[in-house]
Amino acid sequence: MLTRLLPLLLATAPVWAQYAPANPEWNRPVAPFRIAGNLYYVGAEGISSFLLTSPQGHVLIDTGFEETAAQVEANTAKLGFRFTDIKLILATHGHNDHTGGIAVVKRKTGARFLANPAERTTFLEGGVNDFAWPGRFAYRPVTPDGALRDGEPVRVGPLAVTPHFTPGHTKGGTSYAFTVEDSGRPLRVLVACSVSTPGYKLVDNARYPDIVRDVESTIAKMRALPVDIFLSGHGWDFGLTEKAKARATDASAALFLNAADYRAWLDKSLAAFRAELDKQRAARR
C-alpha cells in the first residue's frame, strides 16, 4: 500500500519546501514610523509593508518575504500595536517578496486574507506557476479567505480600503486607495502595485497574451486616481530611505505629500515599458 501511495504523497507534498529565501539587501531592517494619520510603515528597507490602524482592528498591506514577517511583527509591537489586532491582510501581487509572509502572519494573527480572484491560484500554489518565473520564487502557499472586487471597498471597523485591479506586473496586480486624516486634513493614499515588466516577454507571450494591453490600460487607470501620498511595494519608488532619515527632524505628513513623484513614476514606468516593447518588436522583424 505504501509503495502505491508514495508517488501520490510526493506529488502532493507542500511546495513551500521549495521556497526562495529572502533577498538580504531588500530585507534589511528599518525602524518603523508613522507616515500620516493612522498609517504606519512596518516593512524592511527594500520591501514594503504598511499598517493601517483602528481601535476595531488593523489592515496590513503586503508582508514582505517569509523572513520579513518577524520584522513586521516586531515593528508593529514597537509602534505600540498588538500584532493579533491585525484583522485583514491584503497583497499588491503574488510574488514572494510581497506575499511570502502571508501564511505566517495569517497563522499568528488569525486575520482574513482577501485576494484578487485573478491571483487566487497563484497563492494556492505558492507562486510556482508564475507566468514569468515559474518555480523560481516559490513561497509558502496560502488560501485566500475571500475575493476582492475591483473598486469595491473592504472594511475593518471604520477603515475602508478600495482595491483597484492593476494587472501587468502580474495578472492579479492590485493597488489600494484609502484616506487618512492628519491634523484635521484628509489625505488620499495609494499603495500602488508595481507596473514594471522586468525581463518579461512582451511579444507573443503565450502564458500572458494580454500583457501589453494590461500594462497600458493599468497605467492609464492609475493616472486617473487622485493621490496625495504615493507608496509602493518597494521603498526606492517613493524615497523610503531618505524619508526615514528625515523623520528624525520632521514627523509631519508633509514629508510624504508626493503627487508629483507619483506622476513621474508612472511616466518613467511607461517609458521603460514602451522602450522594451519596441525593442522586442524590432527583434521579431
Image: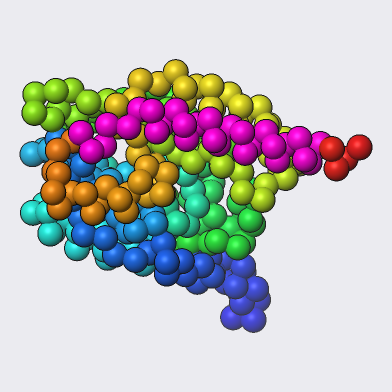
261 or 204: nearer the eye?
Answer: 261
Q: Position of residue 144 (x, y in %)?
A: 40, 45
Q: Position of residue 229 (x, y in %)?
A: 30, 32
Taking the spot 8% from the left edge, 28% from the top edge, the residue there is 183
Camera sees residue 188: yes
**Is residue 210 rendered to the left or right of residue 250?**
right
143 or 232: nearer the eye?
Answer: 232
Place residue 142 in its image quadrant: bottom left
Is the C terminus in the top left, top right, bottom left or bottom right quadrant?
top right
Camera sees residue 103: no
Per the image, is 17 magenta? no
Taking the spot 88% from the left edge, 40% from the top edge, the residue there is 284
**Which range of residues does the magenta coloring cover?**
254-281
Magenta stretch: dominant secondary structure: helix
Taking the spot 18% from the left edge, 35% from the top edge, the residue there is 253
**Is residue 280 rendered to the left or right of residue 47?**
right
Residue found at the very far right of the displayed protein = 285
Q: Position of residue 228 (x, y in %)?
A: 29, 26
Is the N terminus in the top left, top right, bottom left or bottom right quadrant?
bottom right
Query: What is the number of callouts on the image?
Result: 0
Per the image, is 259 magenta? yes
Taking the spot 19% from the left edge, 29% from the top edge, the residue there is 180
Residue found at the very far top of the displayed protein = 224
Vertical placement of residue 163 versus 194, above or below: above
174 or 88: nearer the eye?
Answer: 174
Vertical placement of residue 10 versus 260, above or below: below
Q: Position of residue 267 (x, y in %)?
A: 53, 30
